[in-house]
Image (cartoon, grey):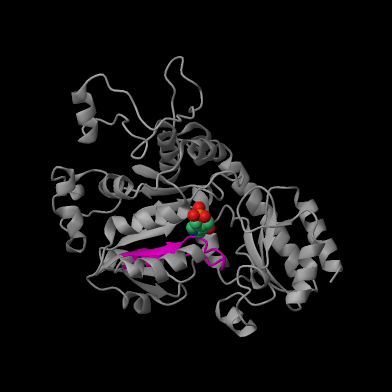
């Protein structure tokens, strides 16, 4: 499938039926698999053959979705996880343990911020946050011999910061350090981090990959571009794994992916459910079409809002005066996605009135699906914070987050326009 273009891979990659089999993957709703002889099963357990034996380790429907996302990202393997958060957790624990540290962009998803800021430190993993706008020298100072990876989002949720791939990949290269990218809001339809030096990609498939707000899921993609062999930073890849017959992961063609599945999925069990894999697989069929529409709709909405007298500011990388417009032209030339934020001239009450006046666009905690939705953090997710603390957290009280769907752009703009008239 390697030579096909991305939009072809969206509909064709991941699963090829044999004669008489279903054209799309079936939902293999079974925990376990039958073996007639014990040697065949033993070979599976030894990773010598790749048959299925228990759905916590692998399942045919999940495999189809994994193969599709791996193809879209240009990876050598992918691992379906229960959610985006479990994908991030398992990716982190595949390389980091007590006494290690990790370097994370502070412009990241709230759940990711909590994971690295609160939960992983309890396991002895220290997290060092950096500002993605900082220059390379400042970010590099955070790295020492105990650092296991550097992580950032292609388009940060909800800050809408576009990642400077060249800056981070040069740092990773100079330190022989693993570079992990959360590509959830860009998706491989708009950006393939592999082209810009990433080694591992993670996704919340709950967002654009599924695209219909129907199923939670996460994905870890091993791009096969990192050499663990002999790298003193990654002892656990170079010493035999006694829990797996002395396997040395660095010697395998899929080092990270195998270690992640053999240790983390096996021991922590946060695997994707077959039904969710089926839904995600179908969603990806239309990914390229949807991302083009999300992006063009969002660009139109951003242009409309930025010229509206009741709007103070708009953040979307399609706008020529956006801070990240240059980076977006380099890394997201075909579209900048459907996520944006804007500030209404006024306070929490003005925003409430605006939100209540919307008819087509609904208020939701979700983002990145086919239906346009809004969230006003100051009166929902961040309502405990004072106006000063809201500013510090990067979510001023007048900020509205908008996830632009694939409806007709005229209807989206008309809905925004009517609601703005009411304030
Ligand atoms: C939503 C999201 C996550 C978490 O994904 P879940 O599937 O909700 O666990 C992680 N990263 C980004 C960028 C997200 O938008």
Q: Residue furthest top?
A: 20
The reply, left or right, for residue 271 in relation to residue 260 is right
Q: Residue at x 59, y 46 (%)?
A: 211
Q: Quadrant of residue 392?
A: bottom right
The reply, left or right, for residue 238 in relation to residue 13 is left
The reply, left or right, for residue 183 in relation to residue 323 is left
Residue 384, position in %: x, y? Answer: 61, 76
State the extent of the magenta-drawn residues as a range.
149-171
Q: Residue furthest bottom?
A: 388
Q: Residue at x 37, y 79 (%)?
A: 138
Residue 270 drawn above or below residue 50: below
Task: Name the residue nearer the viewer: 293 or 146.
Answer: 146
Q: Residue at x 19, y 56 (%)?
A: 236
The reply, left or right, for residue 159 in relation to residue 85 is right
Q: Quadrant of residue 170?
A: bottom left
Residue 152 is covered by the magenta coloring: yes
**Labels in figure, total:** 0
* Residue 82 shows in the view: yes
Residue 108 drawn above or below residue 26: below
Q: Residue furthest front?
A: 31
Q: Residue at x 49, y 27 (%)?
A: 26
Quadrant (top left, top right, bottom left, bottom right) of the C terminus: bottom right
Quadrant (top left, top right, bottom left, bottom right) of the N terminus: top left
Task: Name the residue nearer the viewer: 260 or 227.
Answer: 260
Residue 37 drawn above or below residue 386: above
* Residue 196 shows in the view: no
Residue 125, position in %: x, y? Answer: 31, 68
Residue 45 is covered by the magenta coloring: no
Q: Quadrant of residue 422?
A: bottom right
């Amino acid at each position: 499938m390697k030579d096909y273009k991305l939009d072809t891979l969206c509909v064709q990659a991941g699963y090829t039926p044999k004669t008489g089999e279903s054209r799309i993957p079936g939902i293999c709703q079974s925990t376990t698999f039958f073996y007639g002889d014990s040697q065949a099963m033993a070979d599976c357990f030894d990773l010598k053959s790749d048959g299925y034996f228990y759905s916590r380790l692998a399942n045919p429907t999940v495999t189809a979705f994994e193969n599709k996302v791996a193809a879209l990202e240009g990876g050598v393997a992918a691992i379906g996880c229960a959610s985006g958060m479990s994908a991030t957790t398992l990716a982190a624990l595949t390389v980091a343990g007590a006494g290690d540290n990790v370097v994370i962009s502070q412009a990241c998803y709230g759940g990711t911020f909590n994971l690295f800021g609160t939960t992983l430190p309890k396991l002895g993993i220290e997290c060092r946050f950096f500002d993605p706008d900082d220059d390379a020298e400042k970010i590099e100072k955070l790295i020492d011999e105990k650092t296991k990876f550097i992580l950032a989002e292609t388009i940060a949720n909800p800050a809408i910061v576009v990642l400077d791939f060249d800056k981070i990949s040069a740092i990773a290269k100079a330190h022989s350090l693993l570079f992990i990218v959360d590509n959830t809001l860009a998706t491989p339809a708009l950006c393939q981090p592999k082209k810009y030096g990433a080694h591992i990609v993670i996704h919340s498939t709950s967002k654009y990959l599924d695209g219909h707000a129907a199923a939670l899921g996460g994905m870890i993609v091993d791009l096969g571009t990192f050499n663990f062999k002999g790298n003193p930073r990654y002892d656990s890849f170079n010493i035999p794994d006694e829990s797996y017959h002395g396997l040395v992961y660095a010697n395998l063609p899929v080092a990270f992916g195998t270690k992640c599945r053999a240790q983390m999925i096996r021991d922590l069990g946060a695997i994707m459910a077959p039904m969710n894999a089926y839904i995600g697989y179908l969603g990806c069929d239309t990914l390229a079409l949807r991302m083009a529409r999300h992006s063009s709709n969002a660009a139109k909405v951003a242009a409309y809002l930025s010229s509206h007298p009741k709007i103070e500011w708009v953040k979307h990388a399609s706008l020529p005066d956006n801070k990240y417009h240059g980076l977006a032209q380099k890394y997201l030339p075909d579209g900048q996605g459907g996520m944006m934020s804007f500030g209404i001239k006024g306070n929490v009450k003005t925003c409430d009135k605006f939100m209540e006046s919307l008819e087509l666009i609904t208020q939701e905690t979700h983002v990145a699906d086919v239906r346009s939705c809004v969230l006003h953090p100051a009166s929902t997710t961040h309502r405990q914070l004072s106006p000063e603390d809201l500013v510090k957290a990067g979510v001023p009280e007048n900020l509205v987050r908008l996830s632009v769907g694939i409806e007709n752009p005229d209807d989206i703009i008309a809905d925004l326009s009517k609601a703005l008239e009411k304030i």
